[in-house]
Amino acid sequence: MTMLEVKNVSKSFGGVRANQDISLNVPEGSIIGLIGPNGSGKTTMFNSVVGYHPIDEGNIRFEGQEISKLRVPEIARLGMLRTFQQTRIYGEMNCMDNMRISAPDEGGGAGLRHLFSSVSAEIDEHAEELLDFVGLHSKRLLLAGNLSFGQQKLLEFAMALMRKPRLLMLDEPTAGINPTLINGLIDRLRRANSEFGITLFVIEHNMRVIMNLAEHIYCLAHGKMLAEGPPEEIQNDQRVVDAYLGAS
Amino acid sequence: MIKNIAFVVGLLLSLAAPYLFPTYVTLLAFVWLMVVLSLSWDIIGGQMGYNSFGNIFFFGIGMYVSAVVQRDMFSSGVDRFADVAGGVAVRLSQSEYFISLGVGVVLAAVICVLAAILLGMAILSMRGHYFAICTLGLGIAAGEIASGIDYIGAGSGMVTPIYPEGAGSREAFYYYYFFALSVGTFLLLSKIYKSRFGLVLNAIRDDEDKAEAMGLHTTRYKTIAWSIAAFVLGIAGAGTGNLVGFIDPIDVAFTGATFGVWMILTVILGGKGTLWGPVIGAVIFYATKEFFWTYLLGWQRVALGLLIVVIVVFFPTGIMGWMRERWPHRFGERVEEAS
């Protein structure tokens, strides 16, 4: 079943045509990759999907529902979350508080009573489990802003899991993380997919990572869809190689 | 334990203050007022990270609303109006005075909350400097507009009703008014900051885009936060009009240059985004200010200006922030290995 369907989406910024006629599908339960050289329109694509800016043309459907007119928080509440290329965490709060505030509103309601009550013990427990899952349990009482960049990425990932999304869109999850940690992260992404049932849609520059992780890859270049297919096919696609190496 | 004892002793001292220091009752009432203003400013200025220069707007609105209710509630009819003309204050009986004050305070709080909701929808979508400048305009505009409305005395101001005889001392009454308001606000905020709402405010402060991306109803939360501040400010304004006895639109009600700025400075001095920071900052600031006004008369504003520069340059994170940087362990920041 298709979870996210992007159909003929175009987006321009002034004279720059960042996305032209892009179509792609993310099936439920899958791990899908999005690659492309710098400036090829990957992040624009992500921003369009999560409602960060309106699109010029096309349709975006999440679980069958048209979402191209919805705004960021509304889309997030439907169960589609994104992480940021420039990692974003709440720097002046400790890791536990970062996790606590990422828990979904129970019962979908944001009633005043719920708002002014303290965070429940189950949420605390779940937060600790997830921090343990990403290997940050011992740092849970430190201010998030004092963590290293790589640790902040892991925290952001854990926060996203805390929100219990159906689809998680990751913008370069391994950028700035050291090679040893990367293997651990790939493993955790896989487990998030298989154990928690979260569909993943990943932008990634690290070819080793994305080829290992994704089952289907889309490649953008100059705002257009250049190629798509399973990792082996993409790896051997001459157009993709040219785009990355800069051949014309 | 020691902390709790100190807290109780402080409370008892504050309760006995009007009897211990009868000559300073008005001054001490203003200290509590400063504490209330600082605490209320910190809700959105510190905890939520929205620097508002316009919170004095709600202070002034509350003052006028209450004063009008007190003036008009028991004085309908032409005969009572004749008494009021020419700036003469209304003379009320004891019960009339306190009933109209009670109604005035409640109405002041309610109208301030409504104003905060309406204004919030309009300007809380602005961020950073834009929000700050916009709120700055708000306070100034309100003062100018109030100066032109005859119903509330226009530029020549309004006199609040005379405090009834036989009801004890006016100063002591308003001392306890502001003392109770301070304690109430403090307890309310300490509860709020521990709740989920406190986390929401901090999240908006640290990264509002992230908060939105995580699906938080940021606009709703921002409006609620501003409403809480407006609620407290309305009650504070209502009391201040009566404590001062005369409401000038620019120098007493919408007094951006004094209380409007001071409530921000006290929070910066004490430490933004902390519960105790505004309290500590307010007390130290007000004591220092009074010292300047008493011993450096003629140069008091220069000295205060210098103090402000010193605060901003040397204590950018405030007293509490400085302590937190120095002793992070005391504030719970530590690495904790699994046992």
Image: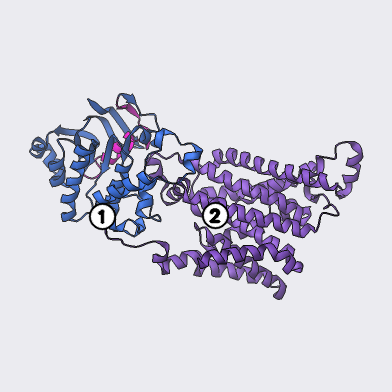
Residue at x 92%, y 39% (from the top left corner): B79
Task: State the extent of the magenta-drawn residues as a range.
Answer: A36-63
What residue type is disc 1 on? Gly
Left or right of residue A48, residue B125 in this image: right
Asked if residue A33 shows in the view, the reply is no
Task: Give A108 or A200, whichever is nearer the viewer.
Answer: A108
Tag 1 and tag 2 share a subunit: no
Horizontal and vertical percent position of residue B199:
44, 49
* Residue A246, above or below B37: above
The colour one sees for chain B in the rendered image is purple
At numbered mark 2, what does the secondary structure look like: helix, strand or loop? helix
Horizontal and vertical percent position of residue B293:
70, 70
**Protein chain holding label 2:** B
Asked if residue A12 shows in the view, the reply is yes
Task: Give A173 or A17, whichever is nearer the viewer.
Answer: A173
What residue type is disc 2 on? Asp
Quarter that holds the N terminus of chain A: top left
Residue A32 highlighted magenta (yes or no): no
Residue at x 60%, y 63% (from the top left corner): B282
At numbered mark 1, what does the secondary structure look like: helix, strand or loop? helix
Residue at x 9%, y 35% (from the top left corner): A233
Residue under label 2: B42
Report which quarter residue B295 is drawn in. bottom right
Label 1: how many Cα within 10 Å (few below 14, some 14–19, many 20+): some
Residue under label 1: A150
- The tally of labels here is 2
**Protein chain holding label 1:** A
- The chain coloured blue is A
Residue A51 highlighted magenta (yes or no): yes
Residue at x 44%, y 34% (from the top left corner): A109
